[in-house]
C-alpha cells in the first residue's frame, strides 16, 4: 500500500499542471499545424505522420476542413481534409497519437485561404459529427475575409476600428460554441496586423485592410474562445512579429496567446523564420505561462533546394528549434 501511495504521489508531483484550456499551466504551449495533404498512405494508423508527431507538442491542429463541409460518418472527401484514408482510420491515428502523448489536444482547423468562400454556408453540426467521429478535442477557426471592410470610428469618444467582418466572426464563434460546449476547445487565428490601429499601436506598420480586424476579440464574445494564434507571417518587410504579439497581448489578457510561425520563405518578402530565428522568437514568449508558439507545417518538407537547412528548415527541424527556444527538454 505504501508503495502504491508513493507511486501516486510521484506521479502527482511530476505530472504537468494543466490550465483551464487543458494546456500546460506552468509554461508556454506548443501547437503544431499538420498538413493533411502531406500524409502518406500506410496500412497501419500507428505509422502515420500524425500518430508519430513528437511528444513536445501540446496541441495538434489538423488542417483543414471546409466551413461548408458535409460528413457521412466515414468518407472525408466532402469535409475538405485531404487524407488518403477514411474517418475510422483517422480516429485510430489520433488514438495512437494520444497513447504516445496522453496530454495532447487535437483540433480540426476550419477554413483557411483555400476555403475562404465557404463561410456563408457554415455547417457547425456537420463539424460536430466529424469531431465526434475522429475523437478530436475541438476546432481552430481560420476565417480569412477577402475584404474585412474596416473603418475608424469613435465609441464613447474613444477611437477604435470597426469592421464588417466583426459580425461574421461573432456569429461563427457563437454558432461553434453552441454545438461545442466546453471542455471542447475553440481556437481562433488572427491576422498579423489585426490588433494594430488603436491606442499605442495606432501607427504600427504595416497598414493594410486587415489593420484592426481582430479588435472584436476583446468584446464579450471573445470569452467563448480558448486559444488565439497570431498569424505572424506573410505581412511584408516592415512587419515585426514581436510588436504584433505585444499588440494582441493588450487585447487578450491572461488567456492563451500563441505566436504563429511558418516555414520559410515568407510569401510577402518579409521576415523568414530560419531555424535560429524560430528558436529566438520562441524564447520571447516564455515569460508568460499563457504564451506559446504555433508552427504551420509540422510535417512539411523544406522549401529549400537542398533539403532541410538552418535557412530552410523542414517541419521536424523547426519543431526541434522551437522546442529548445521554449526551454523544454526531450527536444
Image (cartoon, rainbow, N blue to C red):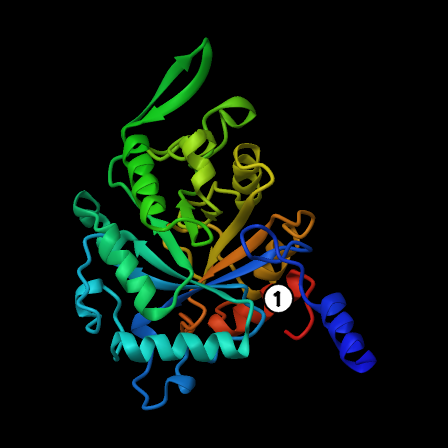
- Across and down, in percent, residue 20 comes to 57, 50
Q: How many marks?
A: 1
Query: Going by the picture, which residue comes out furthest to the right?
Result: 2
**Helix, strand or loop at mark 1:** helix
Residue drawn at (54%, 75%), measured in percent from left and top? 54
Query: Going by the picture, which residue comes out furthest to the bottom?
Result: 43
Query: Going by the picture, which residue comes out furthest to the top?
Result: 157
Q: Which residue is mark 1?
A: 323
Confirm whether residue 307 shows in the render: no
Q: Would you place residue 292 above or below residue 53 in this image?
A: above
Q: Can you say which quadrant of the picture contains the N terminus?
A: bottom right
Q: Nearer the viewer, residue 185 or 316?
A: 185
Q: Nearer the viewer, residue 122 or 235?
A: 122
- Across and down, in percent, residue 310 comes to 55, 70
Residue drawn at (61%, 66%), measured in percent from left and top? 323
Give the left or right position of residue 38, taking residue 75 as reference. Answer: right
Q: Nearer the viewer, residue 41 or 104?
A: 104
Residue drawn at (29%, 37%), measured in percent from left and top? 171
Give the left or right position of residue 210, taking residue 32 as reference. Answer: left
- Across and down, in percent, residue 191 comes to 40, 42
Q: Can you say which quadrant of the picture contains the C terminus?
A: bottom right
Give the left or right position of residue 151, taking residue 323 as reference. Answer: left
- Across and down, in percent, residue 172 comes to 30, 41
Give the left or right position of residue 16, taking residue 122 as reference. Answer: right
Q: Would you place residue 40 above or below residue 58 in this image?
A: below
* Residue 96 placement: quadrant: bottom left
Residue drawn at (55%, 47%), measured in percent from left and top? 256
Query: Going by the picture, which residue comes out furthest to the front?
Result: 1
Q: Nearer the viewer, residue 13 or 241?
A: 13
Mark 1 surroundings within 10 Å by alpha-carbon count, few (fewer than 14), some (14 through 19), many (20 or more): many
Confirm whether residue 1 shows in the render: yes
Amino acid at each position: 500500500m505504501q508503495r502504491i501511495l508513493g507511486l501516486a504521489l510521484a506521479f502527482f508531483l511530476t505530472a504537468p499542471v494543466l490550465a483551464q484550456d487543458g494546456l500546460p499551466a506552468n509554461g508556454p504551449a506548443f501547437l503544431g499545424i499538420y498538413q493533411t495533404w502531406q500524409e502518406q498512405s500506410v496500412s497501419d494508423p500507428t505509422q502515420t505522420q500524425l500518430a508519430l508527431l513528437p511528444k513536445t507538442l501540446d496541441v495538434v491542429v489538423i488542417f483543414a476542413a471546409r466551413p461548408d463541409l458535409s460528413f457521412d460518418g466515414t468518407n472525408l472527401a466532402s469535409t475538405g481534409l485531404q487524407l488518403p484514408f477514411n474517418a475510422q482510420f483517422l480516429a485510430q491515428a489520433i488514438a495512437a497519437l494520444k497513447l504516445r502523448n496522453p496530454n495532447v489536444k487535437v483540433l480540426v482547423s476550419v477554413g483557411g485561404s483555400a476555403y475562404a468562400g465557404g463561410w456563408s454556408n457554415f455547417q457547425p453540426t456537420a463539424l460536430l459529427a466529424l469531431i465526434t467521429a475522429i475523437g478530436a478535442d475541438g476546432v481552430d477557426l481560420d476565417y480569412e475575409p477577402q475584404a474585412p471592410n474596416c473603418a475608424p470610428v469613435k465609441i464613447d469618444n474613444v477611437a477604435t476600428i470597426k469592421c464588417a467582418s466583426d459580425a461574421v466572426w461573432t456569429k461563427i464563434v457563437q454558432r461553434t460554441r453552441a454545438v461545442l460546449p466546453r471542455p471542447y476547445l475553440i481556437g481562433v487565428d488572427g491576422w498579423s496586423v489585426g490588433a494594430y490601429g488603436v491606442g499605442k499601436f495606432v501607427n504600427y506598420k504595416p497598414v493594410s485592410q486587415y489593420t484592426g480586424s481582430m479588435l472584436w476579440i476583446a468584446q464579450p464574445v471573445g470569452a467563448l474562445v480558448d486559444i488565439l494564434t497570431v498569424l505572424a507571417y506573410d505581412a511584408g518587410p516592415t512587419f515585426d512579429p514581436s510588436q504584433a504579439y505585444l499588440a494582441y497581448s493588450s487585447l487578450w489578457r491572461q488567456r492563451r496567446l500563441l505566436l504563429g510561425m511558418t516555414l520559410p520563405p515568407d510569401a510577402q518578402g518579409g521576415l523568414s523564420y530560419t531555424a535560429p530565428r524560430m528558436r529566438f522568437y520562441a524564447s520571447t514568449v516564455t515569460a508568460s505561462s499563457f504564451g506559446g508558439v504555433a508552427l504551420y507545417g509540422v510535417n512539411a518538407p523544406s522549401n529549400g533546394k537542398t533539403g532541410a537547412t538552418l535557412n530552410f528548415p523542414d517541419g521536424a527541424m523547426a519543431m526541434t528549434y522551437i522546442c529548445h527556444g521554449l526551454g523544454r527538454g526531450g527536444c
